[in-house]
Amino acid sequence: MTETEQQGERLQKVLAQAGFGSRREMEEWIGAGRIAVNGTVATLGARVSDGDKVQVDGRPIRLKLQAEQTLPRVLLYHKQEGEIVSRDDPDGRASVFDSLPKLRGQKWVAIGRLDFNTSGLLIFTTSGELANRLMHPRFEVEREYAVRVQGEMSQDQMHQMLKDGIALEDGLVRFEKLSDEGGEGFNHWYRLVLKEGRNRVVRRTFEALGLPVSRLMRVRFGIINLPPRIKRGMMVELGEGEVREILEWVGLPADAPVRQVSDERRGKLHRVKPRKS
């Protein structure tokens, strides 16, 4: 083992902290040979220290080790229906990344996806480690949704969803909480809480019960609620105290100095400009 691998911080951790993606994604990059340290292709388990030269896909990057970490940036965005949570789309549809503030040497990581026809709370951060803590299944972070369906659940179905769950093709689904919010005519509203984020899991669950979803909105992710003042298509950057509270809640260090360049943006609402067709 080289001296670099014996000391310093794990490469995937530092890359994640710098906002290049989650730890798991960074491990995949390392395994694919996309990362080089001091001119040598990195392997899993590699560590980096001050002075090490790191390249991603042949391009040099500057990493910030633990001693010089600043608070990550965190954005809350009220996603609209008709937007995708992806940077690349062959159909050219509007992306939630289109209007995010530009970054230098980092990238915005989306915490939890929402499908094309789902609206509500979407969180972005520059910290891959924070994103991992909020999204990884082993942390069991709650997601709360408001859902409108065509029809109405029976008492037996509500009891089943809370106690035994329902089997889908990719495993059992069980709601942590479920409340009847009423409705008019053929449409009925429910509020539910899940501790997972499988693809289209809410829609697929209600469809399995014979209740097609006509509207779905995420209103909470962990301790982060969708503030009423953030209307559809608007975003806000959290302040220093709010970011520290989130870091402490997920068990990450919250004693880093604040990033001054983004301080004047924090707490201000920004409306996303409509995309030109």
Image (cartoon, helix red, strand yellow):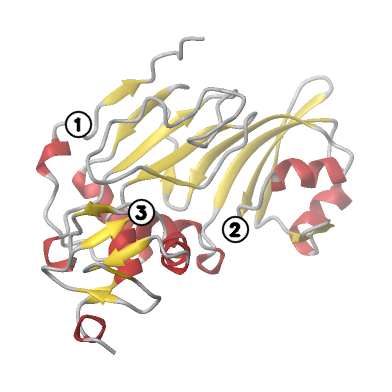
The mark lying in front, picked from 2 and 3, is 3
Q: Identify the element where label 1 is drawn.
A: loop
**Rendered position, 156 above or below 80:** below
Front residue of this view, candidates 85 and 162: 85
* In the depicted structure, whether residue 23 falls above or below residue 9: above
Picture residue at 25% right of the left edge, 50% below the top: 72
Residue named by callout 3: 57
Q: Is 10 on the left or on the right of 193, as rendered?
A: left
Tell me residue 155's x, y (percent): 85, 48
Q: Amino acid at mark 3?
A: Asp
Q: CA distance from mark 2 to mark 3?
A: 35 Å
Tell me what residue is drawn at x 27 percent, y 76 percent.
47
Look at the image and tell me in which quarter the N terminus lies. Answer: bottom left
Q: Residue at x 67, y 48 (%)?
A: 199
Q: From the image, tell me which residue sits under label 2.
A: 195
* Badge 1 vs badge 2, beta-carbon distance below 8 Å: no
| x and y percentages locating residue 27 in the rendered image | 44, 67
Residue 175 position by quadrant? bottom right
Tell me which label, 1 or 2, sits earlier in the chain.
2
Labelled disc at residue 265:
1
Q: Amino acid at mark 1?
A: Arg
Q: Say which element carries label 2.
A: loop
Q: Earlier in the sequence, mark 2 or mark 3?
A: 3
Nearer the observer: mark 1 or 3; the answer is: 3
- Residue situated in front as seen by the camera: 188 or 9: 9
Q: At 27% across and 58% down in the image, what residue appears?
A: 55
| Extreme residue toward the bottom, this view | 1
